Amino acid sequence: MYTNILTTLQDGITTITINRPTKLNALNKATIEELHTAFDTADKDTATKVIIITGSGEKAFVAGADISEFADFSEAEGGELAAKGQHLLFDFVANLRTPVIAAVNGFALGGGLELAMAAHFRIASDTAKMGLPEVSLGVIPGYGGTQRLPQLVGKGRAMELIMTAGMIDAAQALTYGLVNHVVPLAELLPLAEKIAGKIMRNSSVAIAAAIQSVNAAYETGVNGFETEIKAFSTCFGTADFKEGTTAFLEKRKPNFPGK
Ligand code: COA
Protein backbone atom coordinates (compact mmCIF):
# COMPACT_ATOMS: atom_id res chain seq x y z
CA MET A 1 0.00 0.00 0.00
CA TYR A 2 2.86 2.39 0.88
CA THR A 3 6.18 2.80 -0.95
CA ASN A 4 8.26 4.67 1.63
CA ILE A 5 6.88 3.55 4.97
CA LEU A 6 5.79 0.35 6.73
CA THR A 7 2.93 0.12 9.20
CA THR A 8 1.92 -2.63 11.62
CA LEU A 9 -0.88 -2.83 14.16
CA GLN A 10 -0.41 -5.14 17.11
CA ASP A 11 -1.81 -5.13 20.64
CA GLY A 12 -3.21 -1.61 20.29
CA ILE A 13 0.02 -0.15 18.91
CA THR A 14 0.41 1.11 15.36
CA THR A 15 4.10 1.26 14.51
CA ILE A 16 4.99 3.45 11.55
CA THR A 17 8.48 2.86 10.18
CA ILE A 18 10.01 5.23 7.66
CA ASN A 19 11.62 2.91 5.16
CA ARG A 20 14.11 4.57 2.83
CA PRO A 21 17.28 3.25 4.48
CA THR A 22 19.53 3.87 1.47
CA LYS A 23 18.64 7.58 1.77
CA LEU A 24 18.84 7.46 5.56
CA ASN A 25 15.03 7.74 5.60
CA ALA A 26 15.14 11.32 4.30
CA LEU A 27 11.68 12.88 4.04
CA ASN A 28 10.73 13.46 0.43
CA LYS A 29 7.31 14.73 -0.64
CA ALA A 30 5.91 11.25 -1.20
CA THR A 31 7.05 10.08 2.24
CA ILE A 32 5.46 13.08 3.93
CA GLU A 33 2.18 12.37 2.14
CA GLU A 34 2.29 8.68 3.08
CA LEU A 35 3.08 9.56 6.69
CA HIS A 36 0.08 11.90 6.77
CA THR A 37 -2.19 9.11 5.55
CA ALA A 38 -0.71 6.56 7.97
CA PHE A 39 -1.01 8.87 11.01
CA ASP A 40 -4.53 9.89 10.02
CA THR A 41 -5.60 6.27 9.53
CA ALA A 42 -4.12 5.17 12.87
CA ASP A 43 -5.67 8.12 14.71
CA LYS A 44 -9.13 7.30 13.36
CA ASP A 45 -8.76 3.57 14.06
CA THR A 46 -10.25 2.76 17.48
CA ALA A 47 -8.03 -0.35 17.72
CA THR A 48 -4.96 1.93 17.81
CA LYS A 49 -4.28 3.27 21.30
CA VAL A 50 -0.68 4.44 20.78
CA ILE A 51 1.39 5.24 17.69
CA ILE A 52 5.14 4.63 17.56
CA ILE A 53 7.15 6.35 14.83
CA THR A 54 10.64 5.07 14.03
CA GLY A 55 13.12 4.63 11.18
CA SER A 56 14.22 1.46 9.43
CA GLY A 57 17.79 0.25 9.62
CA GLU A 58 20.35 0.81 12.34
CA LYS A 59 21.73 4.10 11.15
CA ALA A 60 18.99 6.68 10.89
CA PHE A 61 15.64 7.73 12.28
CA VAL A 62 15.42 10.41 9.58
CA ALA A 63 18.44 12.33 8.20
CA GLY A 64 16.28 15.32 7.30
CA ALA A 65 14.16 16.65 4.52
CA ASP A 66 15.29 15.28 1.16
CA ILE A 67 17.85 17.88 0.09
CA SER A 68 17.79 16.70 -3.55
CA GLU A 69 14.13 17.67 -3.81
CA PHE A 70 14.39 21.32 -2.75
CA ALA A 71 17.91 22.31 -3.87
CA ASP A 72 16.60 24.37 -6.81
CA PHE A 73 13.47 25.79 -5.17
CA SER A 74 12.49 29.47 -5.40
CA GLU A 75 11.44 31.54 -2.35
CA ALA A 76 7.79 30.85 -3.08
CA GLU A 77 8.39 27.12 -3.45
CA GLY A 78 10.39 27.09 -0.21
CA GLY A 79 7.51 28.75 1.62
CA GLU A 80 5.07 26.27 0.20
CA LEU A 81 7.31 23.34 1.18
CA ALA A 82 7.42 24.46 4.82
CA ALA A 83 3.72 25.36 5.01
CA LYS A 84 2.54 22.14 3.43
CA GLY A 85 4.89 20.00 5.52
CA GLN A 86 3.84 21.66 8.78
CA HIS A 87 0.18 21.31 7.90
CA LEU A 88 0.30 17.72 6.61
CA LEU A 89 2.74 16.19 9.05
CA PHE A 90 4.38 18.15 11.84
CA ASP A 91 1.45 20.11 13.29
CA PHE A 92 -0.81 17.25 12.33
CA VAL A 93 1.16 14.78 14.47
CA ALA A 94 1.53 17.19 17.38
CA ASN A 95 -2.26 17.65 17.51
CA LEU A 96 -3.37 14.03 17.11
CA ARG A 97 -5.72 12.61 19.74
CA THR A 98 -3.69 9.38 19.86
CA PRO A 99 -0.39 9.51 21.77
CA VAL A 100 2.66 9.45 19.47
CA ILE A 101 6.02 8.19 20.76
CA ALA A 102 9.11 8.81 18.61
CA ALA A 103 11.64 5.98 18.93
CA VAL A 104 14.80 7.66 17.67
CA ASN A 105 17.02 4.84 16.39
CA GLY A 106 19.93 6.79 14.86
CA PHE A 107 20.44 10.14 13.10
CA ALA A 108 17.53 12.54 13.67
CA LEU A 109 18.61 15.60 11.75
CA GLY A 110 16.71 18.58 10.40
CA GLY A 111 13.22 17.41 9.47
CA GLY A 112 13.98 14.16 11.30
CA LEU A 113 14.49 15.90 14.62
CA GLU A 114 11.51 18.12 13.81
CA LEU A 115 9.37 15.02 13.31
CA ALA A 116 10.61 13.52 16.58
CA MET A 117 9.84 16.84 18.31
CA ALA A 118 6.33 16.90 16.84
CA ALA A 119 5.69 13.54 18.54
CA HIS A 120 4.28 13.79 22.07
CA PHE A 121 7.54 12.53 23.56
CA ARG A 122 10.76 10.85 22.50
CA ILE A 123 12.97 7.96 23.53
CA ALA A 124 16.31 7.18 21.88
CA SER A 125 18.87 4.48 21.31
CA ASP A 126 22.34 5.16 22.69
CA THR A 127 23.51 5.40 19.06
CA ALA A 128 21.18 8.30 18.23
CA LYS A 129 22.48 11.69 17.14
CA MET A 130 20.31 14.76 16.92
CA GLY A 131 20.64 18.20 15.42
CA LEU A 132 19.22 20.91 13.20
CA PRO A 133 21.97 21.40 10.59
CA GLU A 134 19.92 23.61 8.23
CA VAL A 135 22.06 26.76 8.52
CA SER A 136 24.98 24.72 7.16
CA LEU A 137 22.91 24.48 3.96
CA GLY A 138 21.98 28.18 3.93
CA VAL A 139 18.46 27.62 5.16
CA ILE A 140 16.72 27.37 8.56
CA PRO A 141 14.52 24.68 10.11
CA GLY A 142 11.14 25.02 8.40
CA TYR A 143 9.11 22.21 9.90
CA GLY A 144 8.64 23.81 13.32
CA GLY A 145 12.20 23.32 14.61
CA THR A 146 12.78 26.94 15.61
CA GLN A 147 9.65 26.77 17.75
CA ARG A 148 9.69 23.25 19.22
CA LEU A 149 13.40 22.98 20.05
CA PRO A 150 13.37 26.01 22.41
CA GLN A 151 10.14 24.72 23.98
CA LEU A 152 11.84 21.41 24.76
CA VAL A 153 15.41 22.39 25.69
CA GLY A 154 15.29 26.15 26.41
CA LYS A 155 16.17 29.09 24.21
CA GLY A 156 19.92 29.22 24.82
CA ARG A 157 20.55 25.56 24.08
CA ALA A 158 18.30 25.73 21.02
CA MET A 159 20.07 28.83 19.71
CA GLU A 160 23.47 27.16 20.11
CA LEU A 161 22.37 23.93 18.45
CA ILE A 162 20.77 25.76 15.53
CA MET A 163 23.60 28.29 15.02
CA THR A 164 26.41 25.73 15.20
CA ALA A 165 24.47 23.23 13.05
CA GLY A 166 25.95 20.75 15.52
CA MET A 167 24.82 17.32 16.62
CA ILE A 168 24.30 16.09 20.15
CA ASP A 169 24.49 12.46 21.16
CA ALA A 170 21.78 10.57 23.02
CA ALA A 171 23.34 11.16 26.44
CA GLN A 172 23.34 14.91 25.92
CA ALA A 173 19.81 14.83 24.50
CA LEU A 174 18.78 13.10 27.73
CA THR A 175 20.48 15.78 29.81
CA TYR A 176 18.74 18.46 27.72
CA GLY A 177 15.35 16.79 28.25
CA LEU A 178 14.97 16.36 24.49
CA VAL A 179 14.46 12.62 25.00
CA ASN A 180 12.97 10.90 28.03
CA HIS A 181 14.95 7.65 28.03
CA VAL A 182 18.07 6.24 26.35
CA VAL A 183 18.58 2.50 25.88
CA PRO A 184 20.66 0.20 23.64
CA LEU A 185 19.21 -0.03 20.13
CA ALA A 186 17.86 -3.57 20.62
CA GLU A 187 15.84 -2.36 23.60
CA LEU A 188 14.39 0.73 21.93
CA LEU A 189 11.17 -0.67 20.44
CA PRO A 190 10.53 -2.96 23.43
CA LEU A 191 10.78 0.10 25.70
CA ALA A 192 8.43 2.10 23.44
CA GLU A 193 5.97 -0.80 23.57
CA LYS A 194 6.29 -1.07 27.35
CA ILE A 195 5.51 2.62 27.79
CA ALA A 196 2.66 2.29 25.28
CA GLY A 197 1.29 -0.56 27.40
CA LYS A 198 1.20 1.71 30.46
CA ILE A 199 -0.54 4.45 28.47
CA MET A 200 -3.14 2.02 27.13
CA ARG A 201 -4.41 1.11 30.60
CA ASN A 202 -5.82 4.62 30.87
CA SER A 203 -8.78 6.39 29.32
CA SER A 204 -8.06 7.26 25.69
CA VAL A 205 -10.59 10.11 25.73
CA ALA A 206 -8.97 11.59 28.84
CA ILE A 207 -5.53 11.23 27.21
CA ALA A 208 -6.77 13.06 24.11
CA ALA A 209 -8.09 15.86 26.33
CA ALA A 210 -4.74 16.00 28.15
CA ILE A 211 -2.80 16.26 24.86
CA GLN A 212 -5.06 19.09 23.72
CA SER A 213 -4.64 20.93 27.03
CA VAL A 214 -0.86 20.56 27.20
CA ASN A 215 -0.54 21.72 23.58
CA ALA A 216 -2.65 24.78 24.37
CA ALA A 217 0.23 26.13 26.49
CA TYR A 218 2.24 26.58 23.30
CA GLU A 219 -0.39 28.22 21.13
CA THR A 220 -0.36 31.98 20.81
CA GLY A 221 -3.57 33.68 21.73
CA VAL A 222 -4.92 30.63 23.53
CA ASN A 223 -5.37 30.53 27.30
CA GLY A 224 -4.19 27.07 28.28
CA PHE A 225 -5.84 27.25 31.70
CA GLU A 226 -9.18 27.97 30.04
CA THR A 227 -8.61 25.12 27.59
CA GLU A 228 -7.87 22.84 30.54
CA ILE A 229 -11.10 23.82 32.33
CA LYS A 230 -13.16 23.09 29.21
CA ALA A 231 -11.42 19.79 28.53
CA PHE A 232 -11.70 18.80 32.21
CA SER A 233 -15.41 19.52 32.13
CA THR A 234 -15.90 17.47 28.94
CA CYS A 235 -14.41 14.43 30.69
CA PHE A 236 -17.34 14.39 33.13
CA GLY A 237 -19.71 13.57 30.27
CA THR A 238 -17.76 10.52 29.08
CA ALA A 239 -18.40 6.83 29.65
CA ASP A 240 -14.69 6.48 30.48
CA PHE A 241 -15.11 8.85 33.45
CA LYS A 242 -18.09 6.85 34.73
CA GLU A 243 -16.12 3.63 34.39
CA GLY A 244 -12.90 5.00 35.89
CA THR A 245 -14.53 6.44 38.99
CA THR A 246 -16.92 3.50 39.44
CA ALA A 247 -14.06 0.99 39.15
CA PHE A 248 -12.06 2.91 41.75
CA LEU A 249 -14.97 2.93 44.20
CA GLU A 250 -15.66 -0.75 43.54
CA LYS A 251 -11.95 -1.51 44.10
CA ARG A 252 -11.47 -3.09 40.67
CA LYS A 253 -9.47 -2.31 37.54
CA PRO A 254 -11.29 -0.09 35.03
CA ASN A 255 -12.31 -1.42 31.65
CA PHE A 256 -12.51 1.79 29.63
CA PRO A 257 -14.92 1.83 26.68
CA GLY A 258 -12.82 4.61 25.10
CA LYS A 259 -15.64 7.11 24.70
N1 COA B 1 18.46 14.30 1.84
C1 COA B 1 18.70 13.53 0.78
N2 COA B 1 19.54 12.49 0.81
C2 COA B 1 20.17 12.23 1.97
C3 COA B 1 19.96 13.00 3.13
C4 COA B 1 19.04 14.08 3.03
N3 COA B 1 18.77 14.85 4.08
N4 COA B 1 20.72 12.50 4.13
C5 COA B 1 21.38 11.45 3.62
N5 COA B 1 21.05 11.28 2.32
C6 COA B 1 21.54 10.26 1.39
C7 COA B 1 22.94 10.57 0.89
O1 COA B 1 22.89 11.47 -0.17
C8 COA B 1 23.40 9.20 0.49
O2 COA B 1 22.80 8.86 -0.75
P1 COA B 1 23.69 8.20 -1.96
O3 COA B 1 24.21 6.92 -1.36
O4 COA B 1 22.70 8.01 -3.05
O5 COA B 1 24.77 9.19 -2.24
C9 COA B 1 22.78 8.29 1.53
O6 COA B 1 21.69 9.02 2.07
C10 COA B 1 23.72 7.93 2.66
O7 COA B 1 24.21 9.12 3.25
P2 COA B 1 25.76 9.45 3.44
O8 COA B 1 25.92 10.94 3.50
O9 COA B 1 26.57 8.72 2.42
O10 COA B 1 26.02 8.79 4.86
P3 COA B 1 27.15 9.20 5.91
O11 COA B 1 27.19 8.11 6.92
O12 COA B 1 28.43 9.53 5.21
O13 COA B 1 26.65 10.57 6.59
C11 COA B 1 24.99 12.04 7.57
C12 COA B 1 25.47 10.58 7.39
C13 COA B 1 23.63 11.98 8.28
C14 COA B 1 25.99 12.81 8.45
C15 COA B 1 24.87 12.71 6.20
O14 COA B 1 24.09 11.88 5.36
C16 COA B 1 24.22 14.08 6.22
O15 COA B 1 24.85 15.03 6.64
N6 COA B 1 22.97 14.19 5.75
C17 COA B 1 22.27 15.43 5.61
C18 COA B 1 21.80 15.92 6.97
C19 COA B 1 21.12 17.26 6.84
O16 COA B 1 21.72 18.27 6.54
N7 COA B 1 19.83 17.26 7.08
C20 COA B 1 19.03 18.47 7.08
C21 COA B 1 18.33 18.61 5.81
S1 COA B 1 17.38 20.09 5.81
Image (cartoon, helix red, strand yellow):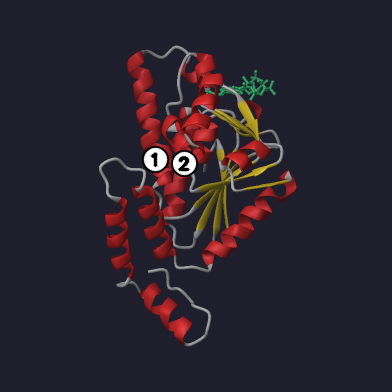
Which residue occupies 53% across, 62% down? 199
Q: Which residue is drawn at 55% across and 57% down?
A: 13
Q: Which amino acid does label 2 sit on?
A: Ala
Question: Seen in the image, is 54 located left or right of residue 220?
Answer: right
| Image location of residue 217, percent across then percent down | 36, 47
Q: Nearer the viewer, residue 96 or 217?
A: 217
For ligand 1, tell me if the residue under mark 1 lies within 8 Å: no
Name the spot of residue 19 as percent of width and height, x first. Answer: 60, 37
Horizontal arrangement in the rendering, residue 174 relative to residue 72 (left or right)? right
Which image quadrant: the C terminus? Answer: bottom left
Q: Which residue is drawn at 62% across and 53% down?
A: 192
Q: Where does label 2 land, which residue?
A: 118
Report whether residue 212 is seen. Answer: yes
Callout 2 touching callout 1 (CB < 8 Å): yes
Q: How far apart are marks 2 and 1 (CA)?
A: 7 Å
Res 77 quadrant in image = top left
Instruction: Name the quarter showing ligand 1.
Output: top right
Up-down: is 124 above or below 251?
Answer: above
Residue 36 location (% of width, % of height)? 43, 41
Q: Name the residue under label 1.
A: 91
Number of labels in the image equals 2
- Say which element carries label 1: helix
Pick whichever, 125 or 84, lies toward us.
125
Residue found at x 71% / y 37%: 127
Residue type at numbered disc 1:
Asp
Q: Is mark 2 within 8 Å of ligand 1?
A: no
